[in-house]
Image: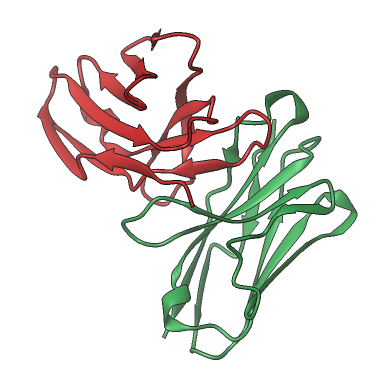
Chain colours: A green, B red
Amino acid sequence: EAGVAQSPRYKIIEKRQSVAFWCNPISGHATLYWYQQILGQGPKLLIQFQNNGVVDDSQLPKDRFSAERLKGVDSTLKIQPAKLEDSAVYLCASSSPSGANVLTFGAGSRLTVL
Amino acid sequence: QQQVKQSPQSLIVQKGGISIINCAYENTAFDYFPWYQQFPGKGPALLIAIRPDVSEKKEGRFTISFNKSAKQFSLHIMDSQPGDSATYFCASGGTSYGKLTFGQGTILTVHP
């Protein structure tokens, strides 16, 4: 079984620039999550999708962050404009309907904002 | 947001020793308590998980102990090995909504 794919693995940008991260979940996994992991901290949920609908985006800074999941498969997380405090690893995870709590994570996309 | 508090922040043990990491949760509606293991440059990977209908679950060298009344659970790693050196995260969630709330993490170092 192929894992959760994420790209790019690394991105360095200047503050106020924009960046986009892509995620391809495990085939058949209806639920997709984006987590933010700041260095030295645990992952924090940004947004949860069920198929292509948003289940929870209560912790997504909507003034600068946006996410979409087209056709209930791939997802894109965008930050515009980026701030210094957005420097973090952005983790994508997915889960299947039969194992709703069992999250499988991708390797993450490391963002550095200068 | 309901918190999950994890301790210690870091832990150093000798090869063959026992590693113990503790976690406390707030939301009594949570009914799923996993531990994730993360190596540098990788995403977290599920290690072991427990539901509150049992007080202990063992898988190989890894054991979760669960105390529902205290709202605490812990991870015990028996016969710790250098390959166990990683960051460990406890988490909690509800079966009905899938998402997990993570602790701050514990950096475990096992010396040969």
- Furthest residue toward right: A71
Q: Quadrant of the C terminus of chain B?
A: top left
**Left or right: where does residue A2 sit relative to residue B65?**
right
**Left or right: where does residue A87 sit relative to residue A63?**
left
* Residue at image point 86% right, 59% down: A70
x, y percentage for residue B93?
54, 34
x, y percentage for residue A26?
72, 39
**Up-down: is A100 above or below A112?**
above
User: Residue B109, located in which quarter of the rendered image?
Assistant: top left
x, y percentage for residue A94?
67, 41
**Left or right: where does residue B110 sit relative to residue B37?**
left
x, y percentage for residue A18?
62, 84
User: Residue A21, located in which quarter of the rendered image?
Assistant: bottom right
Q: Is residue B112 visible?
A: no
* Residue at image point 62% right, 80% down: A64
* Residue at image point 35% right, 61% down: A39
Q: Is residue B58 visible?
A: yes
**Up-down: is A69 above or below B59?**
below
Q: In the image shown, does A38 or A63 lie closer to the viewer?
A: A63
* Residue at image point 32% right, 24% down: B70
Q: In the image shown, does A38 or B103 lie closer to the viewer?
A: B103
**Left or right: where does residue B10 sit relative to residue B27?**
left
User: Residue B103, located in which quarter of the rendered image?
Assistant: top left
